[in-house]
Amino acid sequence: MLVLVWQALTAFAGGSGLNVLVVVNQNSTNSVQLGNDYCEKRGVPPQNLFRMTNWTSGNVAWTRTAFETYLLQPLLDRVSSLGLTNQISYVLLSMDIPYRVEEGDSWNSTTSALYYGFKTNTPPPPNLPVTCSVPDFSSNGFAFSEMPFEFARPDTAETNSFLAFMLTDNTLAGAEAILARGLASDSTFPTQTVYLERTSDAARNVRFFSFDNALFDSRIRADPSLVQINSDSTSFENIRGLLTGFATLSLPANTFVAGALGDSLTSFGGGLFENTGQTPLLAFLDAGAAASYGTVVEPCNYLQKFPDPMAFIYQSRGFDAAEAYYQSVLNPYQGLFVGEPLSAPFAVRCLVEWDGLTNGAVLSGQAALPAALFTGAGSNLPISQIDLFIDGRYARTLTNLSPAAGENLSLALNGSSIKYSIPSNATLFSVTKGLADAVNNQSNSTQVAALPFGDRLELQSLDVARPGTQVVLSASSTPGSHVFLNPARSNCLDTLATGYLGLTVTNPTSPGDWLLLQVTKANGSQMSLSVTNVGTTNVYELCQSLMNAVNASPDLQGNDGIVARDLYTDINLAQFFLYARSAGWPAAKVQASLSTSSNLVVLPAGTHTFEDNVSDLRPRNNVYLCCGAEQVALPFDLDTAQLADGFHELRLVAYEGTSVRTQTQVSRTVQLRNGSLSADLSSGFGTNVTTDVPLTLSVSANSNNIAAIALFSTGGLIGTVSNQQTASFSVPTSWLGVGLHPFYALVTDPQGNQFRTPTLTLRILPSFALTISSMPLMLSWASLPGLSYDILASHDLTSGFQKVDTIIASGTSTSWAIPLVGTQSFYRVRLTP
């Protein structure tokens, strides 16, 4: 018998097990066991497990009606009935649950349908499948927000919105391994490389346009781990992330370190258990990644339907896998998120001491509780809020340090002073927006523009002639302010990106059609190149001829020249890109115009510089805002009369004062005593029981005047007995499933007084039977990795059994060699007590 007492400190990014609802398919023992294991290892309160019943039709697809009937509506009802609406932000789907939702020709992923509702296709562009549409109402407002999810839930959601993830694999062992790697990643601060891979697969290579933005931000953060490569290889070892594009690929088993993110832009990466002819996202998870993403239907290669490389920036800031991935996909309705959502390799926890309260302390009446002292990990990571949770449920906020009206923020930028006074009712995010407006109001004098992203202020120099090193920045706030400004650098950083201009040519060609490209270099020199259709050349081949001419021209080979690359085609349409040969904004001031014969159309018309990616070319800097105090110690009162007498867990959760809101938790188990009612919960077992053994738990109250005795465990209420002083509960071990389960009873008398018993924790194990092999003689049995088993032997059944060995199981099957002793022997195997 064990009393469940949580003493360890744990740190999580914006969410923790307190904020997760775990969904299991009750008709799958694997789903139930995996869900139980997740609850145990992530500290999910027992009431936060939802059992989906009556679904027996596979793990691939279900109709929208079935999804809403079996999962969505019962889940919403459960969250509401438990009063968890403002506590649950994550939903973890524990394997053997369909991953695709279908209605007519509209197919969504189950995770996205839980995230913001089912999205129906709208008419797609001409000549494309209907699934290549991008409905306006499929936009994800959380994307690129750099805000906590609770402050930026998608406004396109039809009901409650959840960061939904599926934890699954081809086997239970595979799914357990994904969970283990996610757990092992927390706060490990890996330094291995993230590869942003530009491949030769033209249709699946399109994400390279977004590489420069993420690379720029990583360099501003002095993080060299993000690297762009031009390669078709996926033979990597011990990397922190991979973003690539292939229909099929293979990955070594040790590709990723714990906590890595990895995915491929392809049509059917989300087809987990179907033969689509493409590599499913499970390949990334089996190679060690903590999370991955793929679409469950043909999406077309639209960038907004796939993760942006900014996911790695968000992760490096401390956001967990779910937050980083959901922030990086603008239209995720066809995309499936799989893995361990709480994996947070860059979460930084604060320090905490709660010396004034010990486990087992007896409290009564209006109890004055001593403060826990929380100390931030640095001035840029203050403590902003402390919440109290009782028995895993949010009780109240003890303190919330918000920006105070009248506090002043100052930026010294390019010799100009920018002031911002915080107004009433401000939040950290409204302050960032207000400071951005103040910068932009003086852009004419400073030649700097500002863009707000949650708690990050991005500064871009508007002066092409001024190097970033000359755009000097300093920041300050009113002494004693709760708001702090933390510039990433003291000046702007010059870009490593190369400017480009995208050109599109449309319509069928005729003999004699021509293209004329006129180029004006930065020094003012001009040149022209032209190609003519002399046969049956189509628009794609005509553009290819022009590109060949550009790349072969001696006048365009120097550092001030240009190069043509990346030709894409569709029916009677071709698109290609012209790049400056040198990196930086000044080099992108080269100009070009493309003209053509009358029956062809060129977009854009006129003369243009190579600044399609101007945001990635301007010198850049970041200012990070945070709010809170470096130390918070807050004593608080607890009205114990509002709770049942007996044993309760008090958990304090402190949040980092940035958008990441990393949690640090500390807890104590206390006894509340305001009346005479009490009760005991007991079991005739030790700490373990197998699924085939009838389990009975007994509750005995100290009064014969009892209205009800209720027993609770994982998933909620087990049963209730009325009008009895003692109760015996037959516990459905096979229903609860393999895993660690807390049990407690709530006793109520006719006057409404209640007593909550100490928590009894039992591990339910799969039943196992011994088998014996022929020579060499071996005992074998089903086992759980990590558990200890005793081997008992006897030469005479009448004299009893003695322990002869103990084995710690390393897998799901364990064997023991029987020694040849020359006499008859009998053997038993038991779990080590």
Image (cartoon, rainbow, N blue to C red):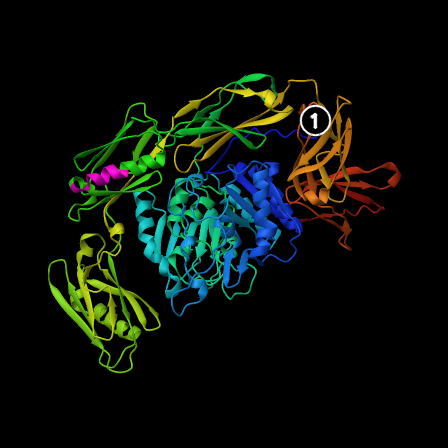
Q: Residue at x 73, y 44 (%)?
A: 691
Q: Amino acid at mark 1?
A: Thr
Q: Position of 109 compared to 461: left or right?
A: right
Most common secondary structure along the magenta stretch: helix
Residue named by callout 1 = 748
Residue extending furthest left?
524
Q: Position of 562 compared to 508: left or right?
A: left
In the picture, the quarter occupied by the N terminus is top right
- The residue nearer to you, when weighing 166 against 51, is 51
Q: Position of residue 656 (x, y in %)?
A: 42, 32
Above or below residue 149? Residue 598 is below
In the picture, the quarter occupied by the C terminus is top right
Q: Secondary structure at mark 1?
A: strand
Q: Position of residue 758 (x, y in %)?
A: 67, 27
Q: Residue at x 26, y 54 (%)?
A: 613
Q: Residues within 10 Å of mark 1 (few under 14, many from 20)?
A: many
Q: Position of residue 479 (x, y in %)?
A: 29, 23
Residue extending furthest right?
798
> Does 821 lie within the magenta span?
no
Residue 671 appears in the picture as rendered? yes
Q: Residue at x 85, y 46 (%)?
A: 824
Q: Position of residue 11 (x, y in %)?
A: 48, 34
Classify residue 147 by image quadrant.
top left
Q: Position of 662 compared to 552: left or right?
A: right
Above or below residue 261? Residue 477 is above
In the image, the segment drawn in magenta is 436-444
Q: Position of 334 compared to 230: left or right?
A: right
Above or below residue 139? Residue 405 is above
